[in-house]
Image (cartoon, rainbow, N blue to C red):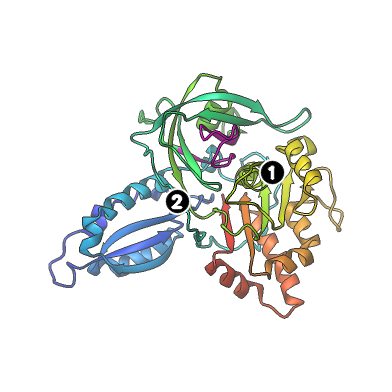
Amino acid sequence: MYNISAAQGDANTESGSRIFLYEVVGLRQSEETDNRRYPIRQSGSVFLKVPYHRMSQEMQRLTRLGSKIVSIRPLNADDEANGKATVVAAKSEVNAKAPAEDKLNVPPEIAPPEDEVKSTKLAPKSKPMTQAKSKTDIPVNIYRPNAPFVGKCISNEELVREGGIGTCRHVKFDISGSDLRYLEGQSIGIIPPGTDKNGKPQKLRLYSIASTRHGDDLNDQTVSLCVRQLEYKHPETGEMVQGVCSTHICHLQPGDEIKISGPTGKEMLLPEDPNANIIMMATGTGIAPFRAYLWRMFKETHEDYKFNGLAWLIFGVATTPNILYKQELEELQEKFPNNFRLSYAISREQKNQEGGRMYIQQRCQELAEDLWSLIEQEKTHTYICGLKGMEGGIDEALSGAAATKGVNWADYQKEIRRAGRWHVETY
């Protein structure tokens, strides 16, 4: 983890004594991960205090780590007096240490093909996150890793049907008696029991929340996750390896205790406009935040919120039995045909126009004209969640559609990202 005190250092000059506050997104987890090839989940901002004499070196270091500097400003007395430096340092610890799921500890060449999304050379480099704009009070880090809330498992249900690949569970936790609250699109941290190979306590893992702010029981007393158990063959020994945290969660029984921190994340929040159009592109467990969105839109009754726009989910999976929440999704499609559109990309069963497997990128290529007609509307927000490999193909599909209207997709994407209408959380 990046050491803030080391970056601050001591300076012998007047200019060197000046401190600046850097807002950074996409900061990698540690120096160790900087030397590896697999992607790191990026979500939210990290704030770093940097002395004037170290600014050039720090910019180079952050660039080397694949991160993006969003803003730089002088650190003032109000920041220190209000404890902002302390708060953001703790937030940095959460984002820096926690992989989204155990599979982030596995290089892509040995990770399981859970979602069948094919990587492409056109995949762009990691892009900065633009936080969704909202008037709602956004809860963040109510419970920290060093003082988590201990909840209990209420239920643990299998989502993969017979004939599917692997196991994926919908797990509901009791959070009654806590101060934990969250919004759709946020994540919570789970701290598995035991120690790692170095004898240190296990670090938390971040998981996207699969329930609305009111929980599956609509009583504000629960939070739910969608967790796939990581299992893969070790490339050298050939033995089967299971993910520490995902295995722990997938084997929880009702009544078992679980350590919870968070919530975290602002990138995937829904707009407050009930007339907005919401495009959702997901692979595998990337469906989690979108399930929360859909429940918020269609399965809850709120005096202050009634969704009137169009929600369109494009969902990439390997086989039909691997369509998570299939019954829920298709019931919503049947009940709300004018407001909810559902499209699947089932790679091992469906063929694309060239006769190859139907990955989510190819499905987006087929639907590019309709997608573009929505995206160019100012009230449309687009969300991508799941494996990073789909990003390049989606960009390619939308580039072609935009070009027919004389629009450069790369430039337009930057515009809607700045406007808070393009949201990505991939790993």
Q: Earlier in the sequence, mark 2 or mark 1?
A: 1
Mark 1 is surrounded, within 10 Å at the Cα level, by few (under 14), some (14 to 19) or many (20 or more) other residues, namely many
Is residue 164 left or right of 354 when viewed as pictured?
A: left
Local crowd size for mark 2, using a 10 Å CA cut-off: few (<14), some (14–19), many (≥20)? some
As rendered, which of 362 and 374 lies closer to the eye? 374
Please state which of residues 110 and 47 is positioned toward the viewer in this rendering: 47
Left or right, 8 with reference to 141: left
Is 221 within the magenta?
A: yes
Amino acid type of the residue that numbered disc 2 sits on in the rendered structure: Ile
Numbered disc 2: secondary structure: loop
**Residue 197 drawn above or below residue 423:** above
Give the vertical position of 365 relative to 319 (above or below): below
How far apart are the two marked residues, 2 and 1, measured between alpha carbons? Answer: 31 Å
The residue labelled by disc 1 is: 115
Q: Which residue is mark 2?
A: 138
Q: Which residues are magenta?
A: 205-226
In-image side of 289 versus 205 (left or right)? right
Query: Is residue 18 visible in this depiction of the protein?
Result: yes
| Amino acid at dot 1 | Asp
Residue 226 screen position, x and y as percent = 60, 36
Nearest-to-viewer mark from 2 and 1: 2
- Determine if the magenta segment contains residue 189: no
